[in-house]
Amino acid sequence: MRFELGALPDDPLGAAAAFHAGALPEILALLAEGAAVVTLVFPPDDPLHRAWREAAVAGLARQSAPARVNAVAGGDAAAIDAAAAFFAAADAVTGQYLPLDSQPGAALLG
């Protein structure tokens, strides 16, 4: 199951607070209802936000085992679909945060 997060505040503390107050209860409800695999889809990755996102995903994964929780950030629909399919098929993978790049190598070719 995919859970798409909408826009979050620009500052890391505000974004973490908004996530924990708004999205977290919904995610926990999905897991309590029996979701076996949840892939969180964050807005594009920002290094200032990475630590709280990684901690939130890892904590959810530990708390929700044997259900699996992973996350991606950014990317286009095809990249998100591919990552979600990977997470769904990888039975031992949980608690991972994967920033996506929709155009790998584009800067090198440019």
Image (cartoon, rainbow, N blue to C red):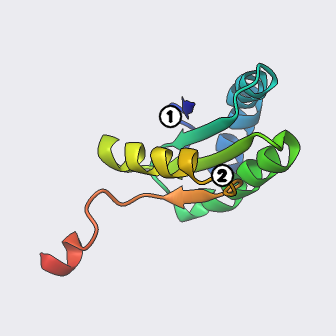
Q: Given the image, on which type of amino acid does mark 1 rest?
A: Ala
Q: Residues within 10 Å of mark 1 (few under 14, many from 20)?
A: few
Q: Is residue 84 visible?
A: yes
> How far across and how far down the image is residue 16, in percent?
71, 44
Which numbered disc, 2 or 1, marks the residue closer to the eye? 2
At numbered mark 2, what does the secondary structure look like: helix, strand or loop? loop
In the image, residue 21 above or below residue 37: above
Q: Is residue 48 above or below residue 105?
A: above
The Cα–Cα distance between marks 2 and 1, rounded to whole angstroms, is 30 Å
Residue 65 coordinates in the image, percent (x, y): 83, 44
Mark sitting earlier along the chain (2/1):
1
Q: Amino acid at mark 2?
A: Asp
- Name the spot of residue 64 as percent of width and height, x first: 83, 40
Q: Is residue 95 above or below residue 15?
A: below
Q: Tell me, yes or no, whether the two marked residues, 2 and 1, touch with CB atoms within 8 Å.
A: no
Position of residue 56 in the picture relative to residue 84 (left or right): right
- In the picture of the structure, the residue carrying the numbered disc 1 is 7
| Residue topped by disc 2 | 91
Q: Is residue 110 left or right of residue 68?
A: left
User: Residue drawn at (69%, 61%), measured in percent from left and top?
Assistant: 51
**Residue at x-position 65% and y-position 38%:** 37
Quick one: 29 or 20, which is closer to the camera? 29
Disc 2 residue crowd, few under 14, some 14–19, many 20+, Cα 10 Å? few
Q: Position of residue 87 (x, y in %)?
A: 56, 50
Q: Can residue 76 be seen here?
A: no
Q: Nearer the viewer, residue 9 or 58?
A: 58
Quadrant that contains the N terminus: top right
Out of 98 and 50, give the one closest to the viewer.
98
